[in-house]
Image: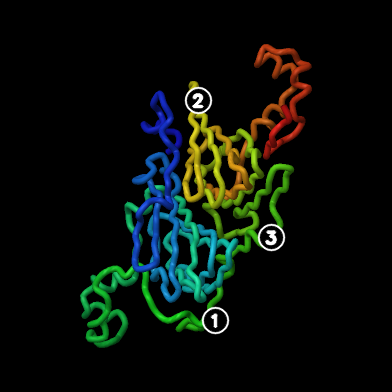
Amino acid sequence: MNNIPDPLLSGKELPTFKFALEKSEGKVIDKSFGKEATVEQLPISKGIAGVSMKIQPGAMRELHWHATAAEWALVLTGRVRTTVIQPNGDSETNDFDPGDVWFFPRGHGHMLECLGEEPCHFILIFDNGYFSEFGTFSISDWIGHVPQPLLAKNFGLPASTFDSFPKDEVYFAMGKEPPAKAAAPLQGVRQPQMTHKFTLLSEKPHGEFPGGREWRVDSSNFPISTTVTGVVLELDPGAMRELHWHPNADEWQYVIDGDIRVTMFGSHGRYREETLEKGDVGYIPQGYGHSIENIGQKGCRILIGFNSGTYEAIDLSQWIASNPVDVLATNFSKSPSLFELFPKKDVFIATPTEK
């Protein structure tokens, strides 16, 4: 679909690519909530949707699946337990701490449960910006709308078994605090070949630079994550993730902490800047040039998701460095000697220069 002109991106001006996710109302049940950023809230974000979810102790996001999107997540605070089933019947239960990541392929049934006495907060990334329009398929909603005789036949139980089952979607279910160690499934343990869990922030950064650090997880080190790549980027005050673009994916940004300025270039002189603060979301379509700059007085941390299982980027400094000086001189009508002053390799994170 990237080969077809998008009316939203074909105008004389670039549209906004910012949404204040944490300031939105979302879906609130007791002390748990889910706040989403889909094309309905941020029309430019057609390739990726995101959710900020907080679950209170004793609560769980009920058994459900997403028919039109895979789910990737980063735990920010608290602890989470998940179960997920694969089409062959294998299932996995995992416990997650802050900085851990999970990935559930499209259509795989799962649940999310708060562990311990403190609430948990995590960010979900979906590889389809439209996914919420088609809805989440919840087990209570399904069972609540199937005739009881059919349920009785399905499970080999009396129809009266389902008299007191919920008739509508529960979404967040309340119960006792989960056991410290997860119990075995009814069917017994049938562990899948590939795990759905990755410990991202407890590992060393993928890259360390004078102005910041980057943690990265894609299918090369987390094989099950075939449609989503995740990055956590830290920038020191004044540092900037340099001008670049992604040939193979859209980019979704969530500001975990700090204040940033994001720029986007869309050809034919179209250029736009947005300022994002903690809890805001940004979105850059595939192939559009952009940068991320820390404009605050302290370090910032940004979660970045891509709707591809393989990370690809072309940085402006590296593009310049990959050309001979005579080519650059002709392109810009400048002296070849000027380009001898440019970086000879990829900068990746640029730092302030002394005036």
Disc 2 to disc 3, C-alpha distance? 38 Å
In the drawing, what numbered circle is on residue 204?
A: none
Residue 20 drawn at (x, y percent): 42, 46
Residue 220: which quarter of the image?
bottom right
Circle 3 residues within 10 Å: few <14, some 14–19, many ≥20: few
Judging by the rendered image, the residue that carries numbered circle 3 is: 203
Residue visible at 42% across and 50% down in the picture: 21
Judging by the rendered image, the residue that carries numbered circle 2 is: 267
Query: Which amino acid type is shown beneath numbered disc 3?
Result: Glu
The answer to whether mark 1 and mark 3 are in CB contact below 8 A is no
Residue 11 as seen in the image, left or right of residue 320: left
Q: Nearer the viewer, mark 2 or mark 3?
A: 3
Residue visible at 60% across and 55% down in the picture: 219
Query: Which amino acid type is shown beneath numbered disc 1?
Result: Ala
Query: Which amino acid type is shown beneath numbered disc 2?
Result: Ser
Residue 152: which quarter of the image?
bottom left
Residue 331 drawn at (x, y percent): 65, 16
Residue visible at 58% across and 67% down in the picture: 97
Residue 309 as seen in the image, left or right of residue 329: left
Circle 2 residues within 10 Å: few <14, some 14–19, many ≥20: few
